[in-house]
Image (cartoon, rainbow, N blue to C red):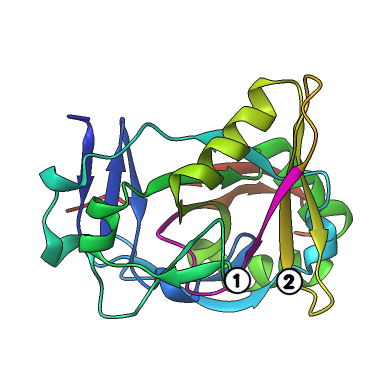
Amino acid sequence: MSDVKITKNFFVYGTVRYFRGGAENIVLAACGEKEDPIGPKASLTVYNTIPREHLKGRVRHIRVNEIDWNSQSKGEVETAAQLTYFTASGSGTASFSYEKAKSARLRLTKFVIDEGDLKAMLNKDAHAARKFLADTGKDGRVVSGVFVVLDGKLEESFSTAVSSGGSVSASLTKAAELQLTANHGGGKSGSTTIVLAKRSTFAYVQHKVKKWNKDKTQIEELELDTHGLG
């Protein structure tokens, strides 16, 4: 795709520039403070993570067009921190590399919490996260979307589940990590599951609070925050 660019600090997909700085520490619904907010190395320093049980019913899958890894630079695709990708067999994850991305034709996929669901979660359930955002001020952020890397078979399973009338559901593992399951529809049986944990995030996007109520106890409006400079 001509509208794709990958660097160590950001990932351009379509018209949006996503963050990559510190991605190894990022999980969906992490809260923190934005560092170097208007600079090229803008990233999120994580303070805490919204309890995973609050994400149930609020996570949506978005298919990403196949990336032409050959058109990207190895020095930009790979970061100092070792990331992982999801596999359809074995341990479930493996070490990600530029060479592996090319040889195995690895795919990116996106999981998001829509703005309305994010606002409802922060106002009704995630009280500690909401207080953190209120106390932190203009640099407070919450991660509303993550890109992760999957092998082709897994990616196809998630995309087919949604297109065939199935769904993607969120649940918890025994270790209280976020587990996402593609439930197949259209008369197709079976399901596919991955566990979102640290080191599995390739890129991410954030939201910030645009407007509070008078005493900053409820969020009235959120605003998407994307990587601004390159």
Q: Residues within 10 Å of mark 2 (few under 14, many from 20)?
A: some
The amino acid type found where label 1 is placed reads: Ala
Residue 196 as seen in the image, left or right of residue 98: right
Residue 152 as seen in the image, left or right of residue 154: left
Q: Is residue 184 magenta?
A: no
**Which one is in front, 89 or 118?**
89
Q: Is residue 196 magenta?
A: yes
Q: Range of the magenta residues? A: 191-204
Residue 135 as seen in the image, left or right of residue 152: right
CB atoms of marks 2 and 1 within 8 Å: yes
Q: Which mark sits nearer the N-terminus, 2 or 1?
A: 2
Query: Looking at the image, which residue is at 67% across and 28% down?
Result: 162
The amino acid type found where label 2 is placed reads: Glu
Q: Residues within 10 Å of mark 1 (few under 14, many from 20)?
A: some
Q: Secondary structure at mark 2?
A: loop
**Which one is in front, 106 or 111?**
106
Q: Secondary structure at mark 1?
A: loop
Residue 178 lies, with reference to residue 218, above or below; the image says below
Residue 221 lies, with reference to residue 204, above or below; the image says above
Tell me the residue that label 1 is attached to: 197
Tell me the residue that label 2 is attached to: 177
Image location (x, y in percent) of residue 137: 56, 66
